[in-house]
Image (spheres, helix red, strand yellow):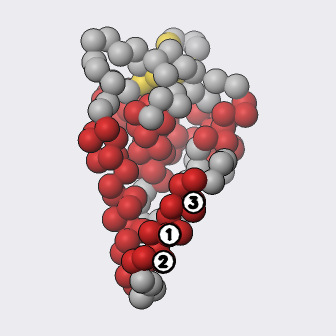
Amino acid sequence: MPPSSLTLFSVSPGSPEPLYRQLMDQIRRLVAGGQLAPGDDLPSVRDLAQSLTLNPMTVSKAYGLLEMEGVLQRRRGLGMQVAGAQGKPALDVAARLELLRPILERAALEARQLELDSNFVLELFQQIFEEKT
């Protein structure tokens, strides 16, 4: 994975969700959405920790748990990479939507706490969704 791909990852230190969990969820979504394909290299623990200003143990924990799930595989001396499909079908739309659901639930809760009209929130979401990154 080239160094510029470090920009794929971000964490929110103020979030109630643990940082390692945020990182795990992002990697799952990137794999499910095809931005990370089987065989793609992930940044080293040290590089990603530096980029996100995290403790390397946080990144290592996320990588290790994703390896146990079969999402990532360790290559001795070469780092982590996205695990091969190994007969597993790609995630369908329903499974990818389930990965997105917790994020949308948090956003909906915050919108309700801010007493925003759902039409305005949906319009803003549509604008954000259509923006090119």
Disc 1 residue crowd, few under 14, some 14–19, many 20+, Cα 10 Å: few
Residue positioned 61% across, 41% down in the render: 8
Q: Is residue 95 above or below residue 22?
A: above
Please, what secondary structure does the residue beneath circle 1 have?
helix
Please, what secondary structure does the residue beneath circle 3 have?
helix
Q: Is there a contact, CB below 8 Å, between mark 2 and mark 1? A: yes
Which of the numbered marks, if any, corresponds to residue 128?
A: 3
Residue receiving disc 1: 123
Which of the numbered marks, if any, corresponds to residue 120?
A: 2
Q: Is residue 109 above or below residue 117?
A: above
Q: As rendered, which of 121 and 74 lies closer to the eye?
A: 121
Asked whether, in this view, residue 93 is left or right of residue 119, the answer is left
Q: Amino acid at mark 2?
A: Phe
Q: Is residue 21 above or below residue 114?
A: above
Residue furthest right in the image: 4
Asked whether, in this view, residue 5 is left or right of residue 40, the answer is right
Disc 3 residue crowd, few under 14, some 14–19, many 20+, Cα 10 Å: few
Q: Is residue 80 visible?
A: yes
Q: CA distance from mark 1 to mark 3?
A: 9 Å
Please, what secondary structure does the residue beneath circle 2 have?
helix
Residue positioned 53% across, 31% down in the render: 35
Q: Is residue 63 visible?
A: no
Q: Amino acid at mark 3?
A: Ile
Residue 31, quarter of picture: top left
